[in-house]
Amino acid sequence: MKYIFKHGSQYIYQRSVPKDLRPHFGKSKISIPLGTRNLAEASKLAAVLADRDTQSFQTLRNGNVSGASALAEIRDLYSADNWVFPEPVLTAFNNQASTLGI
C-alpha cells in the first residue's frame, strides 16, 4: 500500500517528488485526495497514479519537458474517456495545472 495515507475518513495519494525534479514541479510532494473510504479502491487508484508519476518522472529525466508539460500530459491521460477517477482526483490535477499556468 505504497503512497496511501488516511486523512480523516478518506484516503489520499501522497508521493515525494524526486529532488532533481522539484524545480520542474515547484513542490516537494504530490498529494491527491482519492475520494474514497475504501482501502481496496484507494490502493487501485494509488497504483495507477504511482505508475503515471513514475512515467512522468522518467519523461522529465530523459528529455527537456517542463513540469507544466508533464502535468498537462498526465491530466490529459486521466481525463481520457477510458479512465474514470473520482472528482477529487481530477480536481487536484486541474488545481495543480492552474498553479502552473496550464
Image (cartoon, helix red, strand yellow):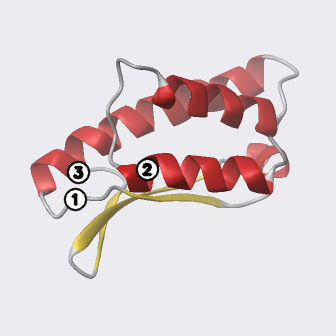
44 lies left or right of 87: left
First of labels 2, 3 by sequence position: 3
The reply to whether dot 3 and dot 1 touch (C-beta < 8 Å) is: yes
Q: Which residue is mark 3?
A: 42
Q: Residue furthest bottom?
A: 8
At horizontal 58% and vertical 34% (from top left) the residue drawn is 75
Q: Residue 51, position in %: x, y?
A: 43, 29
Kind of residue at badge 1: Thr
CA distance separating discs 2 and 3: 11 Å
Kind of residue at badge 3: Ala
At horizontal 27% and vertical 82% (from top left) the residue drawn is 8
At horizontal 68% and vertical 36% (from top left) the residue drawn is 71
Q: Which mark is residue 89?
A: 2
- 79 shown above or below 97: above
> Mark 1, residues whose alpha carbon is within 10 Å: few (<14), some, or many (≥20)?
some
> Which structural element holds mark 3?
helix
8 lies left or right of 52: left
Q: Which mark is residue 36?
A: 1
97 lies left or right of 47: right
Residue 92 in which image quadrant: bottom right
Front of the two marks 2 and 3: 2
Q: Residue 77, position in %: x, y?
A: 52, 23
Kind of residue at badge 2: Val
> Which structural element holds mark 2?
helix
Residue closer to the observer: 52 or 80: 80
> Mark 3, residues whose alpha carbon is within 10 Å: few (<14), some, or many (≥20)?
many
Residue 60 in which image quadrant: top right
At horizontal 69% and vertical 32% (from top left) the residue drawn is 72
The quadrant of the rendering that contains the C terminus is: top right
Q: Residue 26, position in %: x, y?
A: 80, 56
